[in-house]
Amino acid sequence: MTNQQARLQQFMDEASIRNTIARFADSATRSDYAMFKTVWADDGEFIIGTAPYGQHSIGADENVALLRKLRTGKEFFVQFALPGVIVIDGDEATTRTFVHEAARGPGEKYYRNHCIAFDKLQRSGDDWVFKSRSFQYIWLDTGPFAGSGFPLFPEA
């Protein structure tokens, strides 16, 4: 492989990894459970925070079930993800993704956070999937906030 081919492959891999991160945030925000499942390796591990706010699941199906549990009864939920450094080593990669989430519901429950997702990905054909995704809170607020939530428009 020439240097130019190697650089092109690096660029394509980084773009694919960023797309996986974007698909995670998009599917979590829109409750698209079918898409959410596609971002995981069959044995992918999903870790959110630590006690008393910790959640954990292993396997694409369990990870979808965890998202369903977390989304149940929410008036709204949104996740913003900003991919950080990506390090690729063959068919494996690590990233740090900076994340902000906000949600309300059920009832008068509120949730806002800033966290870092420590990601391990593996190549899956031309795409990349999460082998492990671990969210570490750096700020969490469960106090009430103002504003109104609006339902998402169905896809055209």
Image: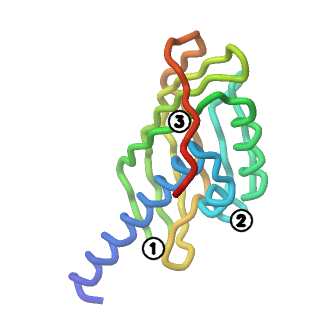
Return the residue at label 1: 90
Q: Is residue 117 left or right of residue 18?
A: right
Instruction: State the residue at coordinates (67%, 17%).
Output: 109
Instruction: Name the residue at the bottom extreme.
Output: 1
Which circle's residue, 2 or 3, is located before the other in the chain? 2
* Element under disc 2: strand
The amino acid type of the residue labelled 2 equals Asp
Residue under the point 44% across and 52% down: 95
Which is more foreground, mark 2 or mark 1?
2
Contact between marks 2 and 3 (CB within 8 A): the answer is no
Mark 2 = which residue? 42
**Tag 3 and tag 1, C-beta contact below 8 Å:** no
Q: Which of 98/95 is in front?
A: 98
Q: Using the numbered discs, state the Cα–Cα distance from disc 3 to disc 1 in whole angstroms.
A: 33 Å
Q: Residue 44 in the image: x percent, y percent?
A: 67, 58
Mark 2 vs mark 1, CA separation in Å:
19 Å
Name the residue beneath numbered marker 3.
78
Name the secondary structure under disc 1. loop
